Image (cartoon, helix red, strand yellow):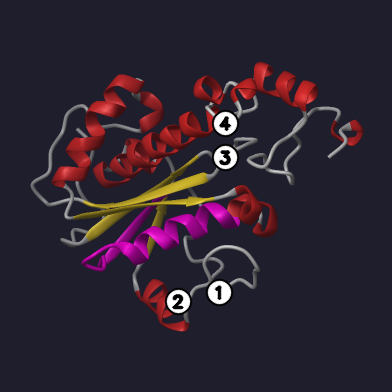
Amino acid sequence: MLSKSYSNLILECGTDEAGRGCLAGPVTAASVLLPAAFENILLNDSKQLSEKNREKLKPVIEETAISFAVTHIFPNEIDEINILNASMKAMQECILQLNPTPEYIIVDGNRPLNGKLGMKQKKGKIFTTEEIEILKSIPTTSIIKGDSKYLSIAAASVLAKTYRDEFMDKIHEEFPMYNWKKNKGYPTKDHREAIKKYGPCKYHRMSFRLLPEQLTLEL
């Protein structure tokens, strides 16, 4: 069983992202506030779970959580602010949607959640001064492999993964040649072969190295 809390505060939320290493599609984040009594022996880091078990856990988390939120950051914004900043911003956007506002935030990874706030950008959500102050006011801790240590981060990882997979399945119908239903936008051999054959589309991250021979790719 994973740990219930890091801070021992009642309103502690966990947050995580999915899809950071993909060549196409959004980076997706989720934040989850779980009740103190929440227990689930199946819940773990989404990468350690089968698709069947992730789908089984998704409604359990949604129905049991005090509050949860999911956010997609799309390729045009990723290309503008870079994937690391986009991942953090997706988590920040999720936290602002939680009701009630969390007292503490635990984040999967080793980077501070609020390292950059209020970035100048043309695409995507622009945080207000009030929203920036809310984010700054909440204590945060980044935890390496937190999704395999704490229930709330594991729950966030499951929601981020399942919501992102659903989105990739949807856009697969628009561009089936990339086989996103299977590879979910990751840099697999079949995905890169399709990019080489058909070129990139509007869902590809143009700031990424889409092909090993990137310099010869006509964009």
Image disc number at residue 60: none
Which one is earlier in the sequence, the residue at label 2 or at label 4?
Answer: 2
Instruction: Determine which quarter of the picture holds residue 105.
Output: bottom left
Mark in the foreground, 3 or 1: 3
Mark in the foreground, 4 or 3: 4
Find disc 1 in the rendering and name its residue. 118
Q: Amino acid at mark 1?
A: Gly
Disc 2 element: helix
Question: Residue 60, position in %: x, y?
Answer: 17, 37
Which one is earlier in the sequence, the residue at label 3 or at label 1?
Answer: 3
Seen as rendered, the residue at the extreme right is 216
Q: Residues within 10 Å of mark 3 (few under 14, many from 20)?
A: many
Query: Relative to residue 174, is residue 170 drawn left or right?
Result: left
Find disc 3 in the rendering and name its residue. 25
Q: Residue 8 versus residue 96: which sits nearer the camera?
A: 96
Is residue 105 found inside the magenta-colored segment of the image? yes
Disc 1 element: loop
Mark in the foreground, 4 or 1: 4
Question: Residue 187, position in %: x, y?
Answer: 65, 27
Residues under labels 2 and 4: Cα distance?
37 Å
Q: Is residue 3 above or below residue 184?
A: below
Q: Amino acid at mark 2?
A: Ile
Quadrant for the C terminus in the image: top right
Residues under labels 2 and 3: Cα distance?
27 Å
Quadrant for the N terminus in the image: top left
Please report the bounds of the magenta region as a residue range: 85-108
Q: Residue 69 versus residue 34: which sits nearer the camera?
A: 69
Q: Residue at x 68, y 17 (%)?
A: 189
